[in-house]
Structures are given as C-alpha cells and as structure tokens.
Amino acid sequence: MRFLNNMTLGQYVPVESLVHGLDPRCKIVGVLFCLVGVFMVRGPIGFLMWGLLFLALVSASRVPARLVLSTVRPVWILVVFTAVIHLFFTSGEPLFSWGVIEITREGAVMAARMGLRLVLLVMYAGLLTLTTSPTELADGLENLFSPLRRFGFPAHELAMMMTIALRFIPTLLNETERIMKAQIARGAELERGGPLKRLRAFIPVLVPLFVIVFQRADDLATAMEARNYTGGEGRSRMYPLKWSVRDSAALVFSVIFCFAAVLLDGRVLLP
Amino acid sequence: MSIDVKGLVHVYHPGTPLETKALDGVTFRAEKGSWLAVVGHTGSGKSTLAQHLNGLLLPTEGSVTVDGIEVRRGEGSLRKVRQKVGLVFQYPEQQLFEETVFKEVSFGPRNWGVPTDTLNERVEEALGLVGIGSDLFEASPLRLSGGEKRRVAIASVLSSGPDYLVLDEPTAGLDSPGRRQLLDLLSNLKALGRGIIHITHDMELALGLADVILVLDEGRSALWGRPDIILGELLERDVRGLVIPDMVRFAGRLRELGYDVPLTWEPSVLAEAIDRSHER
Amino acid sequence: MTGNCLVRFSGVSYTYPGAAAPAIADIDLEIASGEWMAVLGCNGSGKSTLAKHLNALLVPTQGDCFVNELNTRSEDGKRSARRAVSMVFQNPENQIIAAVVEEDVAFGPENLGLPPEEIRERVRWALDVSGLGEMARKPVYALSGGQKQRLAVAGAIAQKPPCLVMDEATTMLDPRGRQDLMEVLSTLHSGGMTLVSITHRLEEILRCDRCIVLSKGRISWSGTPRELFLLGEELDRWGLEIPGMVKVWRELVKKGLLEAEIPPRMGEMVEALCR
C-alpha cells in the first residue's frame, strides 16, 4: 500500500483545473484525435505544434510536470527499443558503418520520429488518466459505448468491471505480498532459479490468490444484490455527466488543430 | 538460548518521500517455554516486528539474534533462522494451496530438505498437535471448515520443527469454542518448550495468558513486564489506541473511590474483593 | 419504542442444495419495528443463514418469511425486503465496490434510480452518521478495517432502510474498530432504526432489547440480555462466552450487592455500589 503512492502509472491527481473540469467523454475523444494526429506527424513543425499544445495542456491541468513526465518511465524501454530498431534496420543513405552494423540517414530520421511519437502518445494518454478519475473514465466510456447496447454490447457491465478491477488493485497487491511472505517463511524460494522453476515456485502464491479472488467475487455479488443492484437499467448517477459549451469548444478546437498540424507539417519536411 | 532483539529500528522506503519509521529502537528478549505477548494499536509496529523475528525483514539499525544466530543476509543465516522461528500470519488459512492436507503440511520440511521418513514423522506429529485426525490427511485443505483450515495452516508451520512460534492475531475471526481450542493449543506448545510470541490487539487476552507483555506505541516500547506488574501503569499511562479491559478500569475506578480491590482480570477475584471491601 | 411487526418468520427451514440436513429448522420469529435484536450462536449454528432470509437473499425451503407482511417468495416481497432491510457483512473488504468513499455510499441510491441531488444529500447524511464525514473523497484502500465497516454501514443506510442487519460485522475488526462501530449502531438505534445483530460476541448485546440463541439451526432460547447473562452451563453448550465484566456483575448480583435490574455496565455498576 505504501509503494502505491509512488506509482504514477498515470494515477489520478485530484486538483481543480480547466482540464479536470472537462467532460470525460470530451477528453477521451480529444485524446483519440491527438493520438491520430501525433501519428500523422512527419516533420519538425508538426512535432513542435503537438509538443507546444501538450505543454499548454499540462500547464492548464495544474498537474506537476514531473508527474506527467514520469508516465513515460514504465515504457521507456519500449521507446528506446523502437528507436533502435528503426535506427539500425532502415535502408537508405548510409551515415555510419561498422562492419555489419549500418546507420542510415533515413534510419536516424525514423528513429527520432517514432521515438518522439511514442513519447508524445504516452504522455497524452497519461494526461488523460492524471486529470480524469477512474470513475469518470468508466462513466465516460460507458456513455460513449451505450449506443452499442442495442447490438448486445455490454457497455455498462464492462464499465462496472473496470471500476471494480481498479478498486481492488491495491488490495490484491497487498494480499500477494502477504501470501508470498507466508510461503517464504515456510522455505519457498521465490526469487531463485530459471524462468520455469520460478513459475512453478509461484503456484503456492497463485492458488491462494485465486481462492481469495473467487471468494471475493461471490461476496461482492451478494453485497451488490443486497444493495438492490439489478444491472445497468434504471441506474442514476451521483455526479451525472454534463456536456457543456466548453467541451464542444475543446472538441472543435482539437479537430481544427489536427487539420492545421497536418497542413503546416506538410510544408516543411526533411528531404 | 533465546531471541534477542536489541535497539531494533526499521525504516520503510528510506530516502523517498514515503519514508516511515515503523520501529524506533525496540529491545526485548523472548525465551523458550515462555509466552510473550506483543500488544499495540494498528500502526504501532507489531507486524513489522513479527517479520523481523524470522528474517522476512532486515533491521535498518540494531540487531535480531535467534539462539546466537544473527539475522542478516549471507551464510545461510536466514534459512537457519526461518527453521527455528515459525511465523503464522493473520488468517493463515489464506496460504493453503496443496491438493491434500498431508502435502500442505509437508511443504515446509520439503523446502528445508528434510529426508522423507523424518518428514512424514514431523507431519504426523504436527497434525496431531493441532488435533487434525488422520481421516483428514488426504482431504483437500480448501474443503475443510474454517477452524480446521486454521489448524492445518498452523500445523504447516509447526512441521518445520521451530523452537519459537510467532503468531499474528491467531484468534482473529474465531468464535469462543474456536478461540479456546486455539489458545489451549498454544499453552500446550509452550508447555512442550516452545517459545510463544503472540501479537495481538487484545489486552485482555494478553493479560490472561502471557508471562511477559511488551506494549508498543508508535514503534517504541511503551511498557514491558509481567501482566500484574504493568497493570497499574496501564491505567495511569494513556497508551495510544490501546483499549484497556473494562474490568481493569472498573477496578481502578473503585480503587479511586476507596475500595480495597486488586487490579485484576479475574472476575471472581474482583467480585470477592468487592464483597469484602463493601463492608466499609 | 417497539411498534408493528417488521419481519415475521413462520416455521422457516432452509436446506442448502446438496446438504443432508437443514441449516436452520422450524424458526418462528417476530421482529418489531424499532427493536434492537441479537441473534446469537457459535459458528455453524445457522446464524448467517437466518440473516440472509431477512433481506430475501435466501428464501425458505420450508415455511414462510414476511417482510412488511409481504411473502419474500414473491417478486414484490423480495423487492420490498431488499428496500426495507439493509445488510452489512463480515468481511469489510469484500463489500466495498467503489474506489472512493462517497462513490461507494452512492452505489445503493444509484441502483434505486434516485435523482442526483437526493443521492448527494443521502451520501452526506450517511457519512456523517457513520463518522466518516471528513473522508468523503478519500480512496478506499487508505481506510482501516473498522473504517471500511463503517463505510459499509453508510452504504447500507443510504437507502434509508427501516432495518439494518449486521451479519457478524465486528468479527474481523480490532477492539477500536468494534467500539467505533457499536457507537454508530447506538446512534442509529436511538434514531428509531430497527437493528439486528448477528454475532457470537456477548459484549455486543448490552444495548439490545432482546436476543435469541441459535444452536444447531434451531432457536434454543429467547429473552433479554440480562436474563441470558444469568444463565449457567447452557452458555457453554451453545458455545457462548460471557465477557469478564459481565461475569463480575453476575457474581455481585448473586452476592446480593447489586440488583439484577442494574445493567452490567461500568458506570451504572459503580453508581449502584456507592449508594
């Protein structure tokens, strides 16, 4: 529980800001636009525009910059890996050569491009989760997907599952730690050996966890039934989603920004 | 031969914004054939302390020595300590996972490399101590009743043959018959020479059963001594989060009003004394 | 203080599917509005099975259950029972749905489709009564076991039920958590709520109006807490243990130093002795 506070895997920061006040649906759709936009960027103008927009949003969100930057930490390996792949395996005009290893200019450009795209992507998504509480996110997603309900898509159930799963992550982490300690106290070696051995060694941890989780599911279902839960029909919300003019303006802005970025970007491309 | 804890300090997450000092210089000794109760509120450091006694946690400062072996990394010291000090967590039935009760209780000795004949002996002995009959040896531990599960879990710690047994709230969630059975088991183990270290919130329980009580407050040792000796201090000092047994407070109030009654947790003793003192 | 009949059991028996014997048998019981009743018994006595009939989580395999005079077998009866009787369960962790305190309290009212303004009002009230008023926006994982149980109480009373059932709700708590919870229950009871405490701890029945003892699925005894405390070896048979303070009270009553009318509470006992 203690180390959870340290994990800013884009965990919600409860402050009041312009960005926090936007409807979650607007933010979700907005982020989707940003993701598409970022992946269409090719040259320095585009990156500059998306970068500046990002900085503006961070400042408007009143979330400490280091928290936003830290969302990249869990995936930096992926970013480096992607960049390296592009750096060494793109054919074209060679810049450097050491025997078999060759770095081309196209490779350098692609590496920089993909690297930057990934970083921006992760940080935009991180900004979403930092400024939107899990409940808001679940509500927003449920609402966005609810038109699909007539086709049998379980929008409400998925949102409920997401909420409950997120709520129990800290609990499960605690319980895992406790069970691991109990087995280590009985002489289990959980940290030694090759991957196969370690996997087998984890059975004494996984089986009890499963038992706990299944019991929990049963208890929760009973508790929910006792509190008159009968599915998504007829439920109201304590804080219903309210779409405002600001949200429409934000969405319109993001569409316009996307187009502008594509257009301006095309003007200056590295040859 | 005992567990010696000297100046034990434990800091979680040193050097980060989450740094917390859970234990701040605790010193005490736990002996074989003796019952030590560690009492304190949630957050007083009890669970942290328990995990130091078998090396699951290592001291930030200070030392923990078990029968002369210092608890630290290297030289197989942790392995040796964990075979000497059995740790039973709260709700230990949550650690059950094997297909049969017998296999579950063999898990410990198997890990310590005990040869098969000795292992089987140890398992049967442990199950016998906790009162699980041989008819249940091949049963699935997950299908037993709550009380049976708990006893199997305790047996699975006993089978490693520890000289000391650390138990964190062993009676949690049990009803009166279950509690009594478990406490009898622990008294029995103490009589057989094991050192019992009993972590609990329940001061009343500790007073009735322990030979020595250690009261923790905010990671520090607030009181230490025999139950009858520390009772007086208990009433005077307001140890944070500790719920003083009603009877003790009752006796204390009567003493203030001039009654000549002892501070005791034995109901009949108190009632007698009140009777005698009532003719004043 | 006690009014009309809220819950009525008539010859109720329940056998779990596949079980050889019934978990509870021939239960006849009436719970009056405004009462605080205790259902006592050790593990395996059938207490929880009985409890689950109060809000129609279970329906009798024999006999009938009536809540507000509606049979819980019918759809109407079931719905009425769930609205009239709220329940708090044993494991604090496994009954909290949401990650934020106030959101969990809102779960019940949201299920009832109440308007948002009313939900917010009820959440505020429920949190205040449960002593969690300052913690509305706190994450649930930061709460202690006792606080989680009080949160569960808040969630249960948010639907404004006439009756609240505590199914072994203190069993997994530490002494402080238990104390805080009992205080919340006292407040609710003074406010007119009907309470049913399912428990094996006799410490908790001091403020109850009435208690029944279940043994092997049947009602073995019924009466007031003080009458229960004066019983002898039956308590051993039923697996119930008298708290230390009550034992002292009992001895003093037997010795004639206290009248049996004086409740076994420290304050009253001291006062009575000094007269």
Image (tube, rainbow, N blue to C red):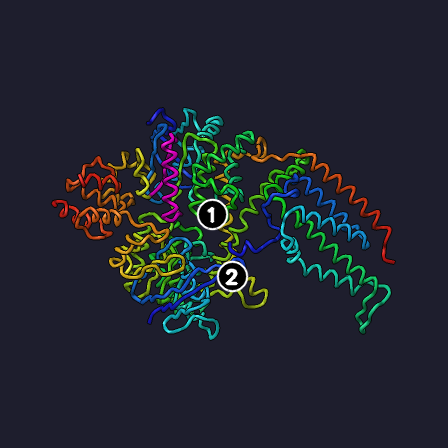
Per the rendering, the mark at residue B13 is 2
> Crowding near pointer 2: few (<14 within 10 Å), some, many (20+)?
few
* Rendered location of residue A57, percent (x, y): 69, 47
A53 sits to left or right of B207: right
Alpha-carbon neighbours of circle 1 within 10 Å: few (<14), some, or many (≥20)? some
Q: Is residue C188 magenta?
A: yes
- The residue type indicated by label 2 comes to His
What chain does mark 1 sit on? C
Numbered range of the magenta stretch = C172-200
Name the image quarter holding the C terminus of chain A. Answer: bottom right
The label nearer to you, 1 versus 2, is: 2
Marks 1 and 2, Cα distance to the nearest angstrom? 21 Å
Name which residue type carries label 1. Answer: Leu
In the picture, the disc for residue C259 is none
Q: Measuring 31% from the left and 58% from the top, which residue is drawn there? A: B185
Give yes or no for residue B151 being in the magenta stretch.
no
Does residue C46 appear in this view?
A: no
Q: Position of residue B249 (x, y in %)?
A: 26, 48
At horizontal 37% and vertical 27% (from top left) the residue drawn is C33
For numbered disc 2, what is the local secondary structure? loop
In the image, which disc is placed on residue C143?
A: 1
Give the x, y percent position of residue A182.
45, 60
Total marks shown come to 2
